Structures are given as C-alpha cells and as structure tokens.
Amino acid sequence: MAFSNIQSLLIRSVVACALFLSFSACSGFQNEELIVEEDCELHVEVPETFTPTIATKLGKEVDSLFTHLHKRKGFNGTVLVTKYDQIIYRGAFGYADFKTKDTLSTQTVFQLASVSKQFTAMAIMMLKEQGKLNYDDSLQVYIPDFPYKGITVRQLLTHRSGLPNYTYFSEEFWPDRKVDLSNDDVLSMMAVHKPNIYYQPDRTFSYSNTGYALLASVVEKASGQPFAEFMREHIFEPLKMHDTYTFNHELVTQTGRVATGHIGGRRKRLPDYQDTVLGDKGMYSTVEDLYKWDQALYTQKLVKRETLEEAFMPTGKVNKRAESYGFGFRLKQVESGDTVIYHGGLWHGFNTYFLRNPKDHSSIIVLSNLTNGSLNYMKDVRNFMYPAQPKNTRKQARVASAR
C-alpha cells in the first residue's frame, strides 16, 4: 500500500476515534488489584457485543497463544493484553533468572530496550509545550559545540538525522570498556573524532540510537534537570509508574525483582559500558506500569491531545512493508485495516514489544528476557487480535469512509 494511503488511513483512524469516543466524566478503571486513575475526557465506546463472557473467552485464547509460544518457541517473559481499555489477559512464563530459577510475575521489571524511545519523545513534547524548545531548532541551540550542522530536534525524533550509530563508533573510540559511557561522553567522542555521517540530514529514514541519545541530552539542556530526574518527576511519578525508572546499577541488580537478560543457550547477559547511555534505551518497567502508560496516552495528563496526535502522524516510509514513523513510535496497518502505533526493542538479552490500536483502545504488551527469536511470532498475536475482514466488509468500510 502506498505511503499516502497509510497517511490517509491514520488520519481517518484518529478522526473516527474522536467521533466514537464518549465525553463522559472519568471515574477510574479497576481490574482486580491493578488500578488506573484517569483524568481524561474521552472514553472509547464499548459495543454491546463485548460482554464479560466474550472478554473472558478472548483472554483464554490469548493465553493459549502464549502458552504455545512458551512451550514450542521458547518464549520467556510477561504479557498484558487489553481491549476497550480493559485487561483481558495478563500472564508470566518462565524465569527472571534461569540460574536461580526465580519465576517471573507481571510485577517483574525488564529493560525496555528501544521501547524506551517513546518516553524520550514524550519528554521532548512536554518541553515543546512548555516553550522550552521547538522541533525545528538546530542541535547547536542546546549543544553549541555539536560538530554536525543542519540537524534539528524533529529529525532526531523521526530518525532522519543521518548520524552514525554510537553503539558502533564507541567500540573504536572509547578506550576502557570497564568504564561506563555517559551521554556526555557520546557528545565528546562526536566532537573530537567526528565519525562520518551515513547521509545528509533529512535525506531519508535511518533508524538511529544516536539520535535518541542526543534527545536525552537536549532534555537535560532545555529543562535544566538530569534526564533521569526529569523522567521520574514529570512522567513516572505523575502516572504512578512506581516500578519504572532509568538505568541504575543498584536498581537493575535487585535479584528477584528485576529480570536478568539472557541470550542464546540461556546464557546470562549482564549490562556493560553502553547501558549507561540513556534516551535510546535504558528504561526499566513492568507490563502493568506500561498499561498505565498506555491509558495515559488517551488522556491529556502529560501533553495536549493535538501535541500527541502530531507524534502519531507518519513522517515518511521507513521500509518495504509501508511502515512509517512518528515521534518514538512506528506506524503500520494490520490485517484488519486498522493503523496501529507500536515499537519493539532488542538489547543485551531483552526483547520487548508494545502495540496500541486507538480504534478499539486495545494493546499488546510483551516483555522478554530471552532473545531467542520467540517475539518474531508476534504477527500471530496481531492477526488474532486484528483479523482480516471479509472482502465484502472491507468494501463496505471503504464506501462508508468515502462518504
């Protein structure tokens, strides 16, 4: 499907969502012991056909899917799935640490890998609303000695800066891998060594960890606060995400509470000198805290609705599958025809997946601490949640959208 069609679909999705949301007062949603306190104006209209019996049935089917992935594909991790803002399934499979046999729970903390990028993008959006930065500012506004010209905050958000990947050039330029690498160190390496750019700014999309590490530095310069402190004070604490934080050596080694990363052969993968660079990764959280995050994105608790909608607008085709990228989120059309907002992550023994569908306020949240390829089967879960419509139904939907 052409990019212009994807863009059109996303716009119609946002408009349709707004039309079908109910402007009733928010009273808060409770699901067993997990409570999300809302301060929103908008709720999705739940169809009469979505009964408690149907929700329970869906949950059992999701459980069957992940049980199969656990037994047949080696999935090890935690899962939370919602529909119409309600949790229909949550579960944990396997171990937080294969050596100690500590079992996982939905309160276990995981490294989010690149799912962290959406939080960094939110910090930038908040500062933009506060008048402390503009998306089209050059990097030199915040980092005067930054050696690459013509790169803007917006280009970092949308992976269009052309900058080289610090995870590669730090292997060449960082002398002692026993010494932690900081965001300031990344800036210093770029200023001193000036590694070659991949392409000119805004020429094309190229996924960039460097870009989001630089955005964390921009957050610090624009806010006057350390990045970790800004995230805690302005995002995690207001949303009561009590098990969410940025990388900290003391916190990430808490046995039993924080999952240990594992690679092939279930070998333990401990953090190294690159883990201390924040913005592109380095957030830790649970599936239950990510549910709070998901729900907050339907409110205006952090930023105005129009600000968030801009973050979900496609800025250009990123691959042959006609996906696009907003601010910290990938955008794609699934089999049902809905346009979903999602991101995956892979880093040092952790594999993560966070998907939201604004049309029915559903989400698929998966955190794994074993990088064995089992999350490659998320397509099966997506196709179950968003199955292809019969041809006649799709034709009727196109006719209706054209009116």
Image (cartoon, rainbow, N blue to C red):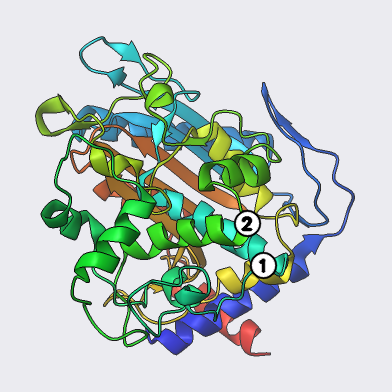
Q: Residue at x 73, y 54 (%)?
A: 299
Q: Secondary structure at mark 2?
A: helix
Residue 131 point in image, percent of width and height:
71, 70
Mark 1: few/some/many CA within 10 Å (<14, 14-19, 20+) = some
User: Which residue has dot 2 on it?
Assistant: 223
Q: Earlier in the sequence, mark 2 or mark 1?
A: 1
From the viewer's perspective, tell me whether residue 388 is left or right of residue 142.
left
On the image, which quarter does residue 242 sit in? top right
- Residue at the far right in the pictured view: 25
> In the shown orientation, is residue 117 left or right of residue 54?
left
In percent of the image, x 35 and y 30: which residue is there? 77
Residue 352 is left or right of residue 48, and the answer is: left
Three-letter residue code for mark 1: Lys
Quadrant assignment, res 189: bottom left
Camera-nearest residue between 204 and 175: 175
Residues at circles 2 and 1 in contact by the CB criterion of under 8 Å = yes
Q: Quadrant of the C terminus?
A: bottom right
The secondary structure type at the circle numbered 1 is loop
Where is mark 1, residue-wise? 132
Report crowding for label 2: few under 14, some 14 to 19, many 20 or more residues within 10 A (C-alpha): some
Residue 41 x, y percent position in the rendering: 83, 56
Q: Residue 380's x, y, as percent?
A: 33, 50
Decide: is 143 above or below 59: below
Judge whether residue 384 can be spotted in this image.
Answer: no
